[in-house]
Image: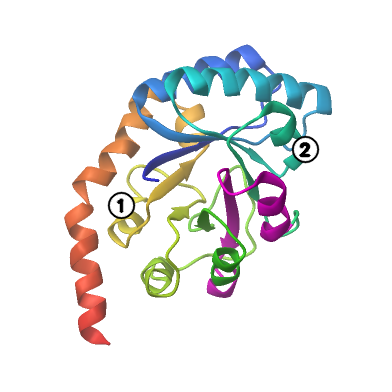
């Protein structure tokens, strides 16, 4: 798991949602999460099914935020759970060993360790920066990624106000994926925005290696 992790906005306009998502996929999205906190069950099913078909055409996984039942109904690729949702162990048991189970760990390494123990596929940390979409009552320190690397073996996702510029120090510290909403969906050119995020992972591979070596040498 590596690259841009695209999270959908709360848009009721399905055509607009699909148009922007398709453009971002053209730009190199690695994984899509369907997240619409305000949708009716019927709209959620319609949009989820349409996004899944789109992601299938691009060979990219679609995970569903929160709604295990929707994932099972659609046959989507996995579920992302937050701190107030079903626990990782329950979701893993329901989905089996082959689906993606993501876990929000905020700024808490203990949550990441528990997520790994219970069968999570990745651990998501954040928010790192102010977000126009998700309101955080805390700020996560970038160095948590270096600490997480020494404590868990899961891929690490970062979220919260991400742009191609402010994501740089997080990728340098070992983030495997950068989750973005507004930077892509509010962009006049979602494909170009996606390409900017995707480019981070080639440009900063060496920086991450050096950062890890510095931390290990200081221990």
Residue 132: quarter of image: top right
- The disc at residue 168 is 1
Q: Secondary structure at mark 1?
A: helix
Q: Tag 2 or tag 1, which sits nearer the N-term?
A: 2
Q: Residue furthest front?
A: 97
Q: Residue furthest top?
A: 15
Tell me what residue is drawn at x 41 percent, y 31 percent.
29
In the image, is residue 161 above or below residue 113? above
Q: Residues within 10 Å of mark 2 (few under 14, many from 20)?
A: few
Q: Which residue is mark 2?
A: 69
Residue 63: quarter of image: top right
Residue 113: quarter of image: bottom right
Q: Secondary structure at mark 2?
A: helix
Percent across and percent down for residue 185 are 51, 28
Left/right placement of residue 110 relative to residue 183 reads right
Tell me what residue is drawn at x 43 percent, y 21 percent.
58
What is the basis of the colouring in this image?
A: rainbow
- Specify the quadrant that holds the C terminus: bottom left
In the image, is residue 200 above or below residue 92? above
Tell me what residue is drawn at x 42 percent, y 46 percent.
178
Percent across and percent down for residue 202 are 22, 44
Left/right placement of residue 213 relative to residue 118 reads left
**Magenta-tinted stretch:** 87-111
In this orientation, which residue lies closer to the viewer: 160 or 22? 22
- The disc at residue 179 is none
């Amino acid at each position: 798991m590596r690259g841009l992790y695209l999270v959908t906005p709360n848009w009721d306009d399905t055509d607009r949602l699909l148009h922007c998502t398709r453009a971002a996929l053209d730009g190199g999205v690695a994984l899509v999460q369907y997240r619409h906190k305000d949708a009716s069950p019927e709209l959620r099913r319609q949009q989820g099914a349409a996004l899944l078909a789109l992601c299938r055409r691009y060979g990219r996984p679609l995970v569903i935020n929160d709604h295990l039942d929707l994932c099972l109904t659609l046959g989507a690729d996995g579920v992302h759970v937050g701190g107030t949702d079903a626990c990782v162990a329950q979701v893993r048991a329901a989905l089996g060993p082959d689906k993606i189970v993501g876990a929000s760990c905020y700024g808490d390494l203990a949550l990441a360790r528990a997520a790994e123990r219970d069968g999570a596929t990745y651990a998501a940390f954040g928010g790192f920066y102010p977000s126009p979409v998700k309101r955080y009552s805390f700020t996560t320190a970038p160095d948590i990624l270096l600490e997480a690397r020494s404590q868990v073996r899961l891929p690490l996702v970062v979220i919260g106000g991400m742009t191609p510029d402010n994501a740089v120090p997080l990728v340098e510290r070992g983030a495997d994926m950068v989750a973005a909403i507004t930077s892509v969906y509010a962009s006049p050119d979602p494909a170009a925005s996606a390409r900017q995020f995707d480019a981070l992972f080639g440009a900063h591979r060496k920086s991450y290696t050096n950062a890890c070596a510095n931390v290990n040498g200081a221990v």
